[in-house]
Image (cartoon, rainbow, N blue to C red):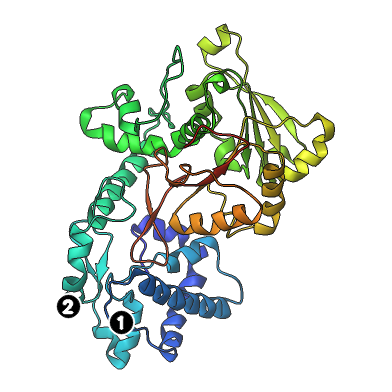
């Protein structure tokens, strides 16, 4: 376990020391468990299973030593522990395998190009390096290898930290524009839509745009879904939208919605996690608009509702008006709070509300689609798969040696009473 700067170590030591002591004890306890396999394999599912099993054992031992559940940060240290690309073993696993010679075990070999992937030996490096450096990664929309994606990820994180440190750069960036008419998004991309408008030197346009997509993915995914779900552009003049399972992230990004749409009359942010804003009392908030929208008399109302959507509809009674679109960003409907989500999906299906769900990664898509189908949704063909307007700020998957996730990376599926999708 390492903390980068001595100042950070001192600042964190009071909270960190108990966990550090528990981790030292873990080194001894872990040697009593069955050792993980050192057999190299290209089967990513098998490697993920090895990593998951070992991490669960470590967490169980740590929680027993500490006498409490691990905090989110403590769990993260275990989940993202560096692992060999060929066998999924960690440095700690290597020391456990070495027994009395544990002190002679060196660190994992880091990929010198990306510095985010590792090998436990030269043999395993030769086994895995071709795939790592040359084979297009399944999560890359442009055919990049895992090594190249890791290099992009590192560079983007550096830019993000610089943005946070520079008080003269007000994130998040959004274009200052009002289009005279709707321009279809079909066939367009982040680069074609925004590169020319981003105020940055050429060498920074790429990383700055990718950082901006982490916020812009919300309105752009909405616009793309509305375009897909409607036969004409009448929706551009009357939108009312509901964000299902809304949380702090969406609530704090109201400016981005206004900058992109400029004519959105009503946005309902609905979800139990909205309680942090409402304090248990639903409310309508008149949001500020840009000068041009103010002069045009446009208004923007955000309704904050700290309820599940089916409870919200029940409370509305006869006054309920279905939105033009209901959308759930990264809902995890098939993994988290499924019992709570299911009646909401059933209601949306029954009332034929145009609805779209997104997901962080491929695995979530499979699980989430099962829930939607079980609730009676007739999922529309052509409204699934990689999201062309998903965030380009990727993150490495925990408990894996491969894989990435990002905000709205995939469209789980959509359903409605009618659609122009063919």
Q: Nearer the viewer, residue 75 or 292?
A: 292
Helix, strand or loop under label 2? helix
Residue, x 50% and y 66% (percent of image)?
A: 75
Residue 397's spot in the image, x, y percent? 40, 59
Kindly indicate whether the residue at mark 2 contacts the one at mark 1 (C-beta within 8 angstroms).
no
* Residue 406 sits above or below residue 242 on the image: below
Mark with earlier residue (1, 2): 1
Outermost top residue: 295
Image mark count:
2
Query: What residue is disc 1 on?
Result: 94
Residue 338's spot in the image, x, y percent? 65, 58
Query: What residue is disc 2 on?
Result: 123
Screen quadrant of the N terminus: bottom left
Report whether residue 280 is seen: no
How dense is the environment of label 1, judged by Cα within 10 Å: few (below 14), some, or many (20 and up)?
some
Helix, strand or loop under label 1? helix
Q: Which of 129 and 223 is in front in this view?
A: 223
């Amino acid at each position: 376990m390492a903390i980068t700067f001595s100042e950070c170590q001192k600042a964190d030591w009071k909270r960190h020391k108990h966990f550090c002591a528990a981790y030292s004890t873990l080194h001894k306890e872990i040697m009593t468990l069955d050792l993980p396999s050192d057999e190299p394999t290209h089967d990513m599912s098998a490697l993920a299973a090895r990593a998951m099993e070992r991490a669960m054992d470590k967490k169980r031992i740590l929680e027993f030593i500490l006498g409490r559940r691990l905090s989110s940060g403590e769990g993260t240290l275990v989940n993202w522990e560096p692992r060999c690309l060929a066998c999924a073993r960690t440095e700690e696993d290597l020391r456990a395998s070495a027994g009395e010679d544990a002190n002679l075990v060196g660190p994992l070999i880091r990929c010198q190009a990306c510095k985010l992937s590792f090998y436990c030996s030269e043999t395993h490096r030769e086994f895995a390096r071709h795939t790592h450096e040359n084979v297009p990664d399944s999560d890359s929309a442009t055919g990049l290898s895992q090594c190249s994606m890791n290099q992009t990820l590192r560079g983007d994180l550096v830019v993000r930290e610089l943005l946070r440190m520079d008080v003269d750069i007000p994130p998040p960036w959004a274009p200052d524009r009002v289009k005279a008419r709707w321009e279809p998004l079909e066939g367009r991309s982040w680069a074609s839509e925004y590169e020319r408008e981003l105020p940055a030197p050429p060498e920074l346009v790429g990383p700055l745009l990718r950082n901006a997509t982490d916020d812009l993915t919300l309105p752009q995914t909405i616009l793309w879904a509305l375009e897909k779900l409607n036969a004409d552009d009448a929706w551009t003049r009357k939108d009312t939208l509901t964000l299902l399972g809304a949380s702090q992230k969406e609530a704090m990004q109201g400016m981005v919605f206004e900058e992109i749409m400029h004519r959105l009359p009503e946005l309902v942010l609905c979800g139990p996690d909205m309680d942090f804003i409402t304090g248990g009392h639903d409310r309508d908030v008149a949001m500020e608009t840009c000068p041009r929208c103010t002069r045009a008399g446009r208004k923007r109302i955000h309704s904050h509702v700290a309820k599940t959507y089916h409870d919200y509809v029940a409370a509305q009674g006869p006054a309920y008006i279905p939105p033009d679109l209901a959308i759930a960003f990264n809902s995890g409907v098939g993994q988290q709070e499924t019992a709570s989500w299911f009646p909401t999906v059933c209601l949306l299906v029954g009332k034929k509300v145009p609805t779209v769900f997104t997901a962080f990664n491929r695995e979530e898509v499979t699980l989430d689609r099962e829930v939607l189908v079980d609730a009676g949704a007739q999922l529309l063909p052509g409204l699934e798969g990689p999201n062309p307007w998903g965030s380009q700020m990727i993150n490495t998957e925990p408990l894996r040696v491969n894989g990435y996730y990002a905000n709205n990376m995939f469209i789980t599926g959509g359903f409605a009473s009618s659609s122009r999708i063919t």
